[in-house]
Image (tube, rainbow, N blue to C red):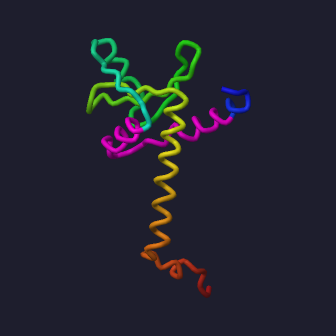
Amino acid sequence: MTRAGIPLLAVLSLAGCAGLQATDTRSAVQALTAAGFQAQPADTPEKLVQLRLLTQGKVLWRPQDGQIRYVYADPARCKCLYVGGDEQYLRLRRHEAMAVNRFFAEEVRGGMTDWGLWEPGPR
């Protein structure tokens, strides 16, 4: 990673920490898996306790062995921790951005919203 990339990554991680606050855990897990995050099971009582203490429904970053690791706790569904590095995290954010862009492109093409209702009217 270049020196110029570190500030960018820091900004992305701060912006992205709240990114996967999905009410549908399945869609969050699908996005994490598609981005290359690996599920690590909480296969000991100690790991399960740590897993339950982590903030759920958010991608968080943690330093590990001199590197940044991104984690997503899923104690209810798989009793596992999804873990990825910089590459997986950036892939996750790109997928999210593409999904948002598709949503707005479909909204504009579909013409389902009457934007005229939002024009300022006489006061």
Task: Relative to 73, say whether 26 is above or below.
Answer: below
Residue 21 counted in the magenta span: yes
Q: Which corner quadrant holds the C terminus?
A: bottom right
Position of residue 54 measured from the top left corner of the image (x, y, whole percent): 41, 25
Q: Which corner quadrant holds the N terminus?
A: top right
- The stretch of residues the image draws in magenta is 8-34
Q: Main secondary structure of the magenta part?
A: helix
Kindly indicate the quadrant of the structure image that contains residue 13. top right
Task: Relative to 3, say whether 101 is above or below.
Answer: below
Kindly indicate the quadrant of the structure image that contains residue 77. top left
Is 22 in front, or is 94?
94
Residue at 35% in and 40% down? 30
Q: Residue furthest bottom?
A: 122
How many circles with numbers are drawn on the protein? Answer: 0
Position of residue 70 measured from the top left corner of the image (x, y, whole percent): 49, 28
Residue at 42% in and 75% down? 112
71 left or right, relative to 46: right
Residue at 34% in and 44% down? 27
Is 38 in front, or is 19?
38
Residue at 52% in and 22% down? 62
Position of residue 69 measured from the top left corner of the image (x, y, whole percent): 51, 23
